[in-house]
Each structure stands twice: as structure tokens, then as C-alpha cells.
């Protein structure tokens, strides 16, 4: 029984290590110069390694541009809805 538990533990460790190695989070950011019109956006960047990096880039763009009524969002692991589309589907979006 101890041997089976050891094998199960090794298996779980291997699977979790492989997942961590190959599953990378990437964040994409968008700035909306006018928070009342979300059809107009500026790409703040792609492939940020963290949510904080994405937020910093969005806030820097808003500050540098002097937008007064801006908003932004960061999306996790986003993909185009269809090839070449401007609409993205993200695992989650946060501010």
C-alpha cells in the first residue's frame, strides 16, 4: 500500500510540474479613451507576464495621453473569436 501511495504522489507531482511548465499565463490589455464608448479601444500591449504588468501599461497609456474619462481591461489568455477578428475571447478579464 505504501508503494502505491508513493507512485500516486510521484504521478501527481509530475503532472502538476508539467502543467506549470507548459501552461503560461499571458495578459493582453486594452484602453478605452472614453469609458462611455467601449467601441473605441487602443491596444495597450500583448503577452504581459502578469496582471500587474498589464495594469501598469494601461494606466501609463491613460496618463501619458491625458485621457479624462478612460477605462481599461486586461484579459487572460485571450484568443480572437475567429481568425483575423478584432473581437477577443478571454479566460477572464479584470481591471
Image: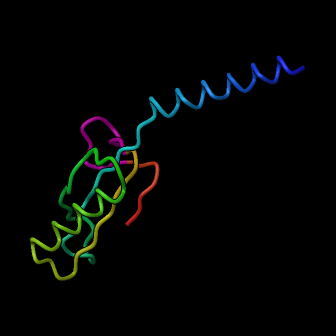
Q: Residue at x 10, y 71 (%)?
A: 64
Most prominent secondary structure in the magenta stretch? loop
Q: Quadrant of the N terminus?
A: top right
**Residue found at the very far bottom of the displayed protein:** 68
Q: How many marks?
A: 0
Q: Is residue 9 left or right of residue 18?
A: right
Task: Pick whichever, 1 or 37, lies toward us.
Answer: 1
Query: Is residue 41 shown left or right of residue 25?
Result: left
Q: Quadrant of residue 43?
A: bottom left
On screen, residue 18 versus residue 26, left or right, reads right
Front residue of 13/25: it is: 13
* Stretch in magenta: 78-88
Q: Position of residue 24 (x, y in %)?
A: 41, 38
86 falls in the magenta region: yes
Q: Position of residue 6 (x, y in %)?
A: 77, 22
Name the residue rendered at 72%, 27% in the picture.
9
Q: Is residue 36 above or below residue 75?
A: below
Picture coordinates of residue 16 (x, y %)? 59, 31
Q: Residue furthest front?
A: 2
Residue at x 14%, y 77% (from the top left corner): 67
Q: Is 37 placed above or below 26 here?
A: below
- Of all residues, the one furthest to the left in this rendering is 65
Q: Looking at the image, is 87 positioned above or below residue 17? A: below
Q: Quadrant of the C terminus?
A: bottom left
- Residue under the image location 10 percent in, 77 percent down: 66
> How far across and down, in percent of the image, does residue 31 sit?
23, 64
Scheme of colours in the image: rainbow
User: Which quadrant holds residue 59?
Assistant: bottom left
Amino acid at each position: 500500500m505504501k508503494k502505491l501511495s508513493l507512485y500516486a504522489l510521484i504521478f501527481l507531482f509530475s503532472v502538476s510540474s508539467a502543467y506549470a511548465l507548459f501552461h503560461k499565463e499571458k495578459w493582453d490589455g486594452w484602453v478605452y479613451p472614453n469609458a462611455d464608448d467601449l467601441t473605441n479601444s487602443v491596444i495597450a500591449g500583448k503577452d504581459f507576464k502578469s496582471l500587474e504588468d498589464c495594469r501598469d501599461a494601461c494606466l501609463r497609456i491613460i496618463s501619458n495621453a491625458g485621457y479624462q474619462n478612460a477605462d481599461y481591461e486586461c484579459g487572460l489568455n485571450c484568443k480572437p473569436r475567429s481568425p483575423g477578428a478584432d473581437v477577443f475571447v478571454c479566460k477572464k478579464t479584470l481591471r
